[in-house]
Image (cartoon, grey):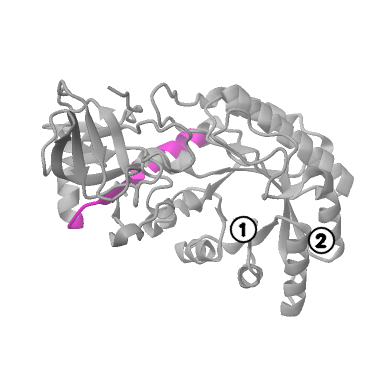
């Protein structure tokens, strides 16, 4: 037996059927027309954002990093819930603008922006988070040729990281941002060149479940922002402090207590040096806002036995859920929360079962040695925590199976 991660507490059953946004999972599949299917519950996204705003300091800007989930209907809804979008490609720029987000509330990060992407961002009037001196030179040259005043911020590679984070984005050699020792000089350069300087983007890490580590990283971030701003001699309009708030995917994970994080951040902002007195502050979050709102539904095609081990083979797999398969950055594969949708509140069978996908690779696993109710062909497997880094972060074209259907409910 291998334990599974915790199913978010708001998912319930009616007559044994998993409800998503008040709708039965099987009826949603019927409405969509097929499986595999991602379902996103808009009401959970709203609730998460409302709770976050209530716990964070008044006036803190909330940005959504759309790489977590760029589903168009979700982005359109997000325009009315958050203060800005953070993007990482020209394609995401198009999606952000199509969703209705104002260009001045969009920031563009990423270490490999092409010239055509820089040109599109400058023409649209979004903020470019500069990742290097070379990128700054290209952006300034393109802006001059266009006769535009570019909105430029400096992304800083901080000299610290977010301890315990699932993905460290700062400290040491990184492809992201400008090393802290050179960041002030670059800001001075873009200001002198006539750019509309927008401030700092400092992202130390992501997917942290340690509140104390997040508090420490946020304090260090504001200290660094103040030191760099003093060196520049100009107050930054905005300090993007990154995100880092994690969500519980795996056995033993506990959800973050936001209250101490919010109280500490309020104190840190209140006590910030004078150079930051007029600055606005933004928190950039992706998975924290949407992960728990998503469920991936995939149908069992076959149940088979091999050397005494039972396998349920589904019509989905890692080509839609690379993260749940354990192939998206995890060192040791652990089980996401998984259930049988039609038997959501049923007792587990006596024998563990492996839930695998339809691909010809042993990497295609959705659950190992899981204790689930008796599984039969036609059953729907529900993989939770599927609202972030699912459909858009998985190799949907692998073996020609194609993308999953996506839909939003509860809106």
The residue under the point 61% across, 33% down is 57
The magenta stretch spans residue 45: yes
Please indicate, yes or no, whether residue 354 appears anywhere in the rendered image: yes
Q: Residue at x 65, y 68 (%)?
A: 118
Report the magenta residues as a range.
Answer: 32-52
Q: Is residue 142 left or right of residue 405?
A: right
> Callout 1: helix, strand or loop?
strand
Residue at 39 percent of width and 48 percent of height = 390
Q: Quadrant of residue 214?
A: top right
Mark 1 Cα within 10 Å, few/some/many (few <14, many 20+)?
A: many
Q: Nearer the viewer, residue 315 or 40?
A: 315
Residue assigned mark 2: 190
Residue drawn at the location 22% of the way across and 40% of the way down: 381
Picture disc at residue 108? 1
How far from the left and from the top, in percent, is residue 342?
Answer: 14, 36
Q: Is residue 410 above or below residue 332?
A: below
Q: Quadrant of residue 153?
A: bottom right
């Amino acid at each position: 037996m291998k334990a599974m991660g915790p199913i978010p507490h708001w998912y319930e059953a009616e007559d044994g059927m998993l409800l998503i946004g008040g709708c039965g999972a099987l009826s949603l599949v019927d409405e969509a027309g097929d499986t595999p299917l991602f379902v996103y519950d808009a009401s959970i996204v709203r609730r998460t954002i409302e709770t976050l705003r209530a716990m964070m300091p008044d006036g803190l800007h909330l940005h959504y990093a759309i790489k977590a989930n760029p589903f168009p209907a979700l982005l359109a809804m997000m325009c009315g819930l958050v203060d800005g979008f953070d993007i990482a490609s020209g394609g995401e720029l198009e999606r952000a603008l199509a969703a209705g987000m104002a260009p001045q509330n969009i920031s563009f990060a990423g270490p490999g922006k092409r010239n055509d992407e820089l040109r599109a961002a400058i023409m649209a009037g979004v903020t470019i988070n500069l990742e290097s001196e070379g990128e700054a030179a290209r952006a300034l040259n393109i802006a001059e040729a266009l006769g535009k005043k570019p909105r430029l911020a400096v992304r800083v590679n901080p000299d610290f990281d977010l301890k315990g984070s699932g993905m460290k984005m700062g400290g040491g050699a990184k492809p992201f941002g400008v090393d802290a020792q050179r960041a002030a000089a670059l800001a001075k350069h873009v200001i002198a060149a006539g750019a509309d300087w927008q401030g700092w983007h400092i992202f130390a890490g992501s997917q942290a479940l340690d509140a104390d580590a997040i508090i420490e990283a946020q304090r260090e971030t504001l200290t660094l922002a103040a030191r760099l701003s003093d060196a520049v001699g100009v107050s930054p309009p905005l300090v993007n402090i990154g995100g880092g708030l994690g969500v519980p995917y795996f056995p033993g994970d506990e959800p973050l207590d936001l209250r101490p994080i919010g109280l500490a951040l309020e104190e840190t902002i209140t006590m910030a040096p004078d150079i930051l007195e007029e600055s606005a502050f933004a928190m950039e979050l992706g998975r924290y806002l949407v992960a728990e709102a998503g469920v991936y539904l995939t149908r069992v095609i076959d149940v088979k036995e091999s050397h005494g081990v039972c396998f349920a083979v589904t019509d989905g797999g890692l080509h839609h859920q690379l993260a749940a398969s354990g192939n998206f950055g995890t060192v040791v594969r652990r089980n996401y929360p998984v259930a049988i949708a039609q038997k959501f509140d049923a007792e587990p069978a006596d024998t563990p079962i492996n839930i695998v996908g339809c691909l010809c690779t042993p990497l295609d696993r959705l659950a190992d040695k899981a204790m689930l109710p008796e599984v039969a062909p036609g059953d729907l497997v529900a993989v939770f925590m599927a609202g972030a880094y699912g459909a858009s972060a998985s190799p949907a074209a692998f073996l020609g199976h194609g993308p999953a259907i996506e839909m939003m409910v509860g809106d």
